[in-house]
């Protein structure tokens, strides 16, 4: 209950104060390129458009609505083309697009009274910092369950997580982003990524416990 009642100040402040230019330009540390129109089209067609399925899946997991997800993806691609000179060719286009989408979700959908649940991470930020913990969870049921998306129970459990927890599960376990990439997408330190992911996986594990036992898995 406390998780749902207390504001996550760093995420909300960034979401309400960041304008379109900052969303995109900060992701490339203000480096700009001067692409020709043909180069822009080539980048858009060959680096941006191949990510559209992943973009839609991410958007739908955030919004739970097909139309909203489509609108969010469309807005993301419009911004991506508008600020394409801020994209460093040859870098991770998927991570760059995901960051734009995430910022658009925060800025636009919260304004439409579709504000996602907020959580307080202070109690867990310093907990998950060791490589030993990393190794101990890589074969855990919660990871395998998310990767395989076994049945409606898993999907429903993932969707029931607060958006900040749900997002790190999606980015890491479904989309395969590294901690460094996730930190850039979410605008948080790597240590925060680790602790948030640890907490999210534990929450998902609890939600899946009964289902896992019925399937013969042991924690």
Image: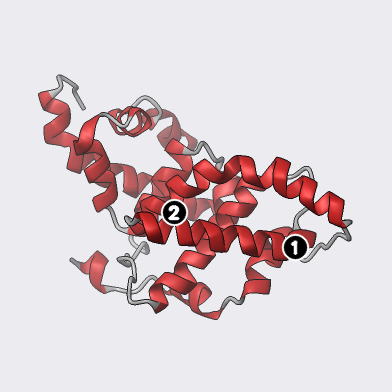
Disc nearest the viewer among 2 and 1: 2
Q: How many marks?
A: 2
Residue ID at (32%, 67%): 118
**Residue 5 shown left or right of residue 190 in the figure:** left
How far apart, in angstroms, are the residues tagged by discs 2 and 1? 25 Å
Residue 59 badge: 2
Disc on the earlier residue, 2 or 1: 1
Q: Nearer the viewer, residue 66 or 120?
A: 66
Quadrant location of the C terminus in the rendered image: top left
Question: What crowding class fits label 1: few (fewer than 14 Cα within 10 Å), some (14-19), or many (20 or more)?
Answer: few
Residue ID at (72%, 64%): 83
Residue 113 quadrant: bottom left
Residue for badge 1: 29
Give the structural element (helix, strand or loop) at label 1: loop
Q: Position of residue 10 (x, y in %)?
A: 47, 71
Q: Position of residue 109 (x, y in %)?
A: 41, 70
Is residue 169 placed above or below 210 in the rendered structure?
Answer: below
């Amino acid at each position: 209950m406390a998780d749902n009642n207390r504001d996550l100040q760093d995420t909300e402040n960034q979401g309400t104060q960041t304008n379109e230019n900052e969303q995109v330009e900060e992701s490339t540390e203000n480096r700009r390129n001067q692409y020709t129109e043909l180069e822009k089209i080539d980048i858009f067609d060959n680096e941006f458009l191949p990510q559209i399925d992943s973009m839609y899946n991410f958007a739908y997991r955030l919004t739970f609505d097909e139309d909203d997800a489509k609108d969010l993806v469309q807005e993301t691609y419009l911004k991506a083309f508008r600020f394409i000179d801020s994209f460093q060719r040859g870098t991770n286009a998927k991570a760059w697009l995901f960051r734009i989408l995430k910022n658009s979700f925060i800025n636009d959908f919260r304004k439409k009274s579709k504000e996602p649940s907020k959580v307080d991470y202070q109690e867990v930020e310093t907990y998950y910092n060791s490589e030993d913990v990393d190794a101990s969870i890589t074969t855990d049921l919660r990871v395998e369950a998310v990767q395989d998306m076994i049945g409606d129970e898993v999907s429903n459990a993932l969707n029931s997580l607060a958006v900040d927890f749900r997002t790190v599960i999606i980015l890491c376990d479904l989309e395969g982003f590294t901690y460094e990439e996730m930190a850039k997408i979410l605008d948080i330190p790597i240590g925060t990524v680790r602790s948030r992911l640890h907490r999210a996986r534990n929450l998902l594990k609890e939600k899946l416990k009964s289902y896992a036992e019925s399937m013969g898995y042991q924690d």
